[in-house]
Amino acid sequence: MQTSELNYFKEILENRKEQISKNIDGVHNELESLNTLELNDEGDHAAVNNNSMVESAIVSQQMQELQEIEVTLGKIANGDYGVCEMCEDLIGFQRLKVKPHAIYCIDCREIVEKSK
């Protein structure tokens, strides 16, 4: 992969990493503010708990993506970026444009998904 392409993906990944970090911080701040509210009835408690569960699920998913991005940035630094972890072929440029932190080529991704 050319240096310009690596820089392109690195910039995308770093921007996404920053966005996710801001999202996670925002959710944590919102959850803290919800905990300080004086709730009047069980309906209020249920609504707050429901929001907390949804936001916690979102944070969990974003934390996973953040970890994948960190691993991918390490691969860029090591020169291993864009190589499928299963078949060791190059991951297509278009696939990386859609998901810059992809670890599998299209064919191997389908195999992994079918085996789950």
Image (cartoon, helix red, strand yellow):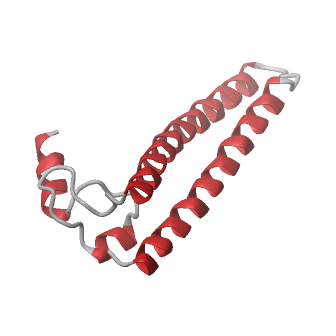
Foreground of the two, 26 or 108: 108
- Which picture quadrant has residue 14? bottom right
Q: Residue at x 57, y 39 (%)?
A: 59
Residue 40 falls left or right of residue 26: right
Q: Does 16 appear above or below 112?
A: below
Q: Residue at x 34, y 60 (%)?
A: 81
Q: Does 93 appear above or below 78?
A: below
Place of residue 25 in the rendered image (x, y in percent of width and height, measured from the top left): 72, 42
Place of residue 70 in the rendered image (x, y in percent of width and height, measured from the top left): 49, 47
Foreground of the two, 100 or 88: 88
Foreground of the two, 109 or 51: 109
Q: Does 41 appear above or below 17?
A: above
Place of residue 28 in the rendered image (x, y in percent of width and height, measured from the top left): 72, 35
User: How many numbered discs sit on the rendered protein?
Assistant: 0
Q: Residue at x 65, y 47 (%)?
A: 21
Q: Spot the residue most to the front.
A: 78
Place of residue 75 in the rendered image (x, y in percent of width and height, measured from the top left): 38, 54
Looking at the rendering, in which quadrant would you find the N terminus?
A: bottom left
